[in-house]
């Protein structure tokens, strides 16, 4: 049975250089194992007869380039994914955030917006949404457009409702959306408190001061150099005593900023920025 050839390491480096030099997308410090896996998946899916054909297509076809970048940066997400994380936020972090006169939260790598909307619901149920603003950013403009719509497959709502209950939710989850044929449209009350914007963690700088930054399951795609670069960005963006939440396979422990942070609980991937005298 015919199998498509795989992208070799030297081909991958060529592709990464092309993306930077021709189109300005910088993937040089992404995890090679992760990006190679995604490129090979796209190579096979799109049935290229050779690497040269794929390279040429990426050089001349902007529509395909857009699909390609979307394909290698897409994140799997769902509302209240990792329910224990949200339960901990609900009981331990959100009440502390409530002591601030205004709450700013940054969801970095927001994909299609499920995490940002989940946080909005937590704030709503803590009676804090009225004094909160959630900045949800991603490199990928296509997923941001989808996120702004606040429209999800109605079939997904059953899973999201189960996640919500596991995360300590106490309302009927259906109050947060309107069913319309095969889709669920989230309430405007939630979307009005979320600003979706394109931001590149690799090249863009800090743009505000936040009490909570959530960047979950994004850094696993970066090498250690780039992870430290992003941690520095987050450090510059967090208020004193602000919180940084990471994914289950990510850690702040070996980073350059680790000494300025304290893990809030041994089994939770949430750190709090400490106050140090100058």
Image (cartoon, grey):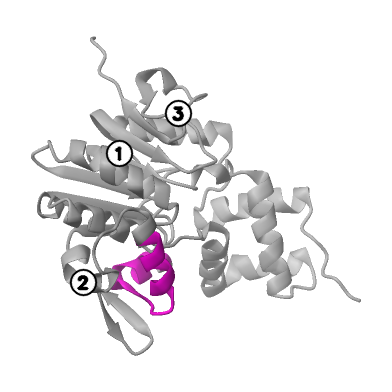
| Nearer the camera: disc 3 or disc 1 | 3
Q: Report the Cα–Cα distance between label 2 and label 1.
A: 30 Å
The numbered mark, 2 or 3, whose residue comes first in the sequence reads: 2
Hey, which residue is sitting farthest top in the picture?
A: 278
Q: Main secondary structure of the magenta part?
A: helix
Q: Residue 52: percent from the left, percent from the top?
A: 75, 65
Disc 3 from disc 1: Cα separation? 29 Å
From the viewer's perspective, is residue 65 above or below residue 242? below
Write down the residue under mark 2: 187
Location of mark 1 (residue): 206
> Is residue 207 shown to the viewer in this render?
no
Answer with left or right where residue 115 lies relative to residue 208: right
Quarter of the view holding residue 172: bottom left
Residue where numbered disc 3 is placed: 266
Going from N to C along the chain, the mark reached first, 2 or 1, is: 2
Element type where label 1 sits in the image: loop
- Mark 3: which secondary structure? loop
The magenta-colored residue range is 143-164
User: Percent x, y for residue 79?
Assistant: 38, 61
Q: Horizontal and vertical percent for residue 270?
A: 39, 35
Q: Residues within 10 Å of mark 2 (few under 14, many from 20)?
A: some
Rendering quarter of residue 42: bottom right
């Amino acid at each position: 049975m015919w199998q498509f050839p795989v992208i070799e390491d030297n081909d991958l480096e060529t592709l990464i250089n092309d993306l930077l030099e021709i189109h300005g997308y910088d993937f040089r410090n992404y995890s090679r194992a992760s990006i190679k896996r995604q490129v090979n998946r796209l190579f096979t899916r799109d049935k290229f007869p050779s690497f040269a054909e794929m390279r040429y297509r990426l050089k001349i076809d902007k529509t395909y380039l857009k699909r390609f970048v979307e394909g290698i940066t897409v994140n799997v997400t769902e509302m209240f994914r990792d329910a224990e994380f949200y339960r901990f936020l609900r009981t331990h972090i959100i009440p502390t955030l409530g002591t601030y006169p205004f709450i700013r939260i940054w969801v970095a790598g927001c994909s299609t917006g499920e995490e940002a909307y989940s946080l909005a619901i937590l704030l709503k149920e803590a009676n804090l949404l009225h004094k909160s603003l959630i900045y949800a950013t991603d490199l990928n403009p296509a997923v941001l457009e989808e996120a702004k719509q606040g429209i999800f497959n109605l079939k997904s709502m059953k899973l999201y409702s189960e996640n919500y209950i596991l995360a300590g939710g106490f309302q009927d989850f259906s109050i947060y959306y309107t069913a319309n044929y095969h889709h669920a449209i989230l309430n405007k009350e939630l979307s009005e408190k979320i600003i979706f914007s394109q931001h590149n963690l690799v090249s863009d700088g800090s743009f505000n001061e936040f009490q909570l930054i959530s960047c979950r399951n994004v850094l696993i795609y970066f090498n250690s150099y780039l992870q430290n670069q992003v941690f520095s960005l987050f450090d510059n963006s967090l208020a004193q005593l602000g919180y940084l939440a990471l994914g289950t396979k990510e850690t702040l422990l070996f980073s350059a900023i680790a000494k300025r942070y304290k893990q809030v609980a041994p089994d939770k991937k949430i750190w709090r920025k400490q106050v140090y005298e100058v």
